[in-house]
Amino acid sequence: MISGKEGFQVKKAWKVSLMVLLLLLIGGAGLTQTVRARAASSVPNVSVKVHYFRPDGMYSSWNLWMWTVDTTGAGHNGASYNFNGTDAYGAVADLSIPADTGQTAATAQVGFIVREGDWVAKDIDTNRFINIAQGSGEVWLVSGDPTVYTSLDAALEGKKPRVANAFLEDNQTVVAKLTTPVNFPYAPGDVTVTDTTTNKQLPVKSIVPHDNSSSLQSDLVTITLGVAPDVTHTVELALKDVKAATITPRNVLNNSQYTYTGNDMGSQYTPWFTSFRVWAPTASQVNLQLFNSESGALTKSVSMHKSEKGTWHLDVLGNLKNWYYLYQVTVQGQTQTAVDPYATGIAVNGTRAMVVDLRTTNPAGWNSDHHQTPAHPEDAVIYEVHTRDFTIDANSGVTNKGKFLGFTEQGTKGPGGVSTGVDSLKELGVTDVQIMPSYGFASIDETRSDQYNWGYDPRNYNVPEGAYATDPHGTARITQFKQMVESLHKQGIGVIMDVVYNHTFTTRISDFDKIVPGYYYRTDFSGSYTNGSGTGNEIAAERPMVQKFIRDSVKYWVNEYHVDGFRFDLMALLGVDTMKKISNDLHAINPGILIHGEPWTGGTSALPDSQLLTKGQQKGLKLAVFNDNLRNGLDGNVFDKTAQGFATGATGLTDVIKKGVEGSINDFTASPRETINYVTSHDNMTLWDKIAASNPNDSVADRIKMDELAQSVVMTSQGIPFMQGGEEMLRSKGGNDNSYQAGDAVNEFDWSLKAQHKDVFNFYAGLIELRKSHPAFRMTSAEAIKEHLTFLNSPANTVAFQLKDYANNDRWRNIVVVYNPTKAATQLTLPAGQWKVASVTEELDTHASANISGSATVAPISMEVLYQN
């Protein structure tokens, strides 16, 4: 996603997108991406009055998101409404709610969410509803309480002091958040902990302020029990004159007694029996529901057996190939069905898990397919692409447009006879394709061909996305993903997966929360989900069984699908410890694997700063981070479309560029392998659009020079170069800086641009060939860079450096590179000796350049490369 504190603001659109899906899935209603005016409807408005009480008295930042539900049960688009008054109870919203455009049936309910700001937080993380009778409805709400009260008396009872949330943090330690502070010292005898499953009280040893201070009052308390509660039982906490709440086992589940280390999670198929194992340590009952078809009725339900370390296990005899299954899990008296998080096959849209014989999904020759990884990470040239964008254009010449199989077609041609698809990648010379999310994500209906999303809303982590298969049903998605990988490998191109383990598409109805409520996500002591991702939740990757899931998942993709690397979305949120283990795991399988990610968050995280994998924290972990310092230096701040950078007209940025050129070893890296150098990615504007926005009065010719200069810096800097797919043909999205759901018209590769800008394509290909042919641009250690790279004195606002003494065993003895972003030619004094000019767009070493010495003239807005043999 995007970087820095500003990134949270941009990511609000993601949160709205995820909320849309949540509402639609549970039959509530839609959210529009932005609040919009309502068109008139023949259905009359309804009147609602919402009374809202917060113990802290802080109302100004809170508002309501509301939508109508008609008498047919259909939900409609929503909008934001402010509280517009107060009474003795609290804040009041006295509203007239119009029917949605196109709504024809009367409004039966009004759905609502109490939210802070523009989805900064939600008071209750579920949709609630107001019943409409005679055209109106009135309700009372208490912050943190999911109950929708329909009378003032009931609400007044509900707002009395209560335990807002209580967590079992260790075997005998409970931390509780109260709506009203209690006074200390507080008698343990006034604390009641009841196992309602056995109707027995548990002894209480002490209650103190959570911070162990000498405070006389606190609303956050730590309670020490005399015995350990059974985590599969329902246990309630009550204090004198404080209403009770159920205790949720949380960090207690980090203990070794609940940490399963086996490699048989999920379903393990054989023709004779299938084994099932799920981690559900707080469940009192788990049933396996089996279906002999994708959408048919339940075939049978079988009780699973409680097994070791919090897992439940069952062997089912017979051949269950291509059967479907769900887990029915009972926790604290509540029973829900969930899809196996470890599912390796799924029904369309991920509604059921599938038992798969993975051997039958392998394409011909799969067993002889091998990873394509560079000798050193710095040898990679990474090309980011969205599966659908790449070939969906009517002029792509590809038969399987927008599909995994689009990457398998060769000999495809576009307008003007240019090569397209994988042939174009080969012609360009990139070493690795980074494919945007291609696991099963939640935001689109896989059965419809008109659906579009980037896919940063994970649902089924271990299965390819069905929308990119020619058939979203069955195992086609599995086989065709493998065919894509195999085809790219045959072309010498590696496959990097863009993965999103930092958050999921939703929380309480997610399979994680259904199976082990309160464990997989970071929550504060009030029970609210923390929002480090900017999407409403963040995965608690530091917890052992969450960490195990992520580690198992990436290993599965490497072993089963032969992927060659990973790009981790919002990698900072996964944490240093988790990413260290992931890196070790993956390098043990494939020593050449490429691992990189975003060293930032999308909001304020509950993970301690010392564990956030921000720039500098990656040192020594054998992984890289995106270098937004160089990105912003080259092209200007991504959150200001008019901002210019070094390559696009700004001055005073030479020091930023120099740090990037030397692999950021004097900034935040320990070695050049730790920086991903880039100027644009899928987030924000394309390079061509950003240049147009920041230089509206410049000629097209000068903008092209700026584009080429920006990419020249990326390709000649130490580190790992990365480019957004389509940059090589001046790809435009019409200025759209967040096209995650903008559809094909905005996002598709327009292959006619390649014919139109063939000179630009050739320049990019020449840059890549220059880098690949000359290891001096690909040094592998900070020591080598310090020995062989020196900056030269150059005119103001230019950068020049020398790679000397056969750097990294280059065949050129010395190389000089000059970046001139100014609009005037500049003179550079050269080191002693005779020099030749290298041509980027012609085969290297054959360009007939006369020897020059003394000085070199560098054209406006350009890069010059000179060398000595």
Image (tube, grey):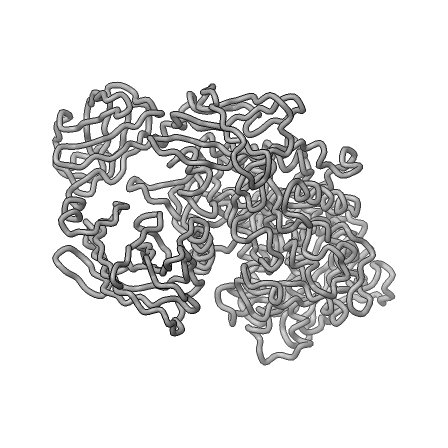
Name the residue at 39% across, 33% down. 335
Residue 816 showing in the rendered view: yes
Q: Position of residue 502 (x, y in %)?
A: 48, 44
**Which corner quadrant holds the C terminus?**
bottom right
Residue 583 showing in the rendered view: no
Name the residue at 35% across, 47% down. 125
Q: Is residue 818 above or below residue 330?
A: below
- Which quadrant of the view contains residue 478? top right
Q: 254 or 819, which lies in front?
A: 254
Q: 381 or 233, which lies in front?
A: 233
Name the residue at 69% across, 50% down. 470
The answer to whether residue 672 is left or right of residue 220 is: right
Name the residue at 56% across, 73% down. 693
Q: 95 or 737, which lies in front?
A: 95
Q: 254 or 805, which lies in front?
A: 254
Q: Position of residue 742 (x, y in %)?
A: 55, 63
Q: How many marks?
A: 0
The answer to whether residue 847 is left or right of residue 2 is: right
The answer to whether residue 790 is left or right of residue 456 is: right
Q: Position of residue 671 (x, y in %)?
A: 60, 44
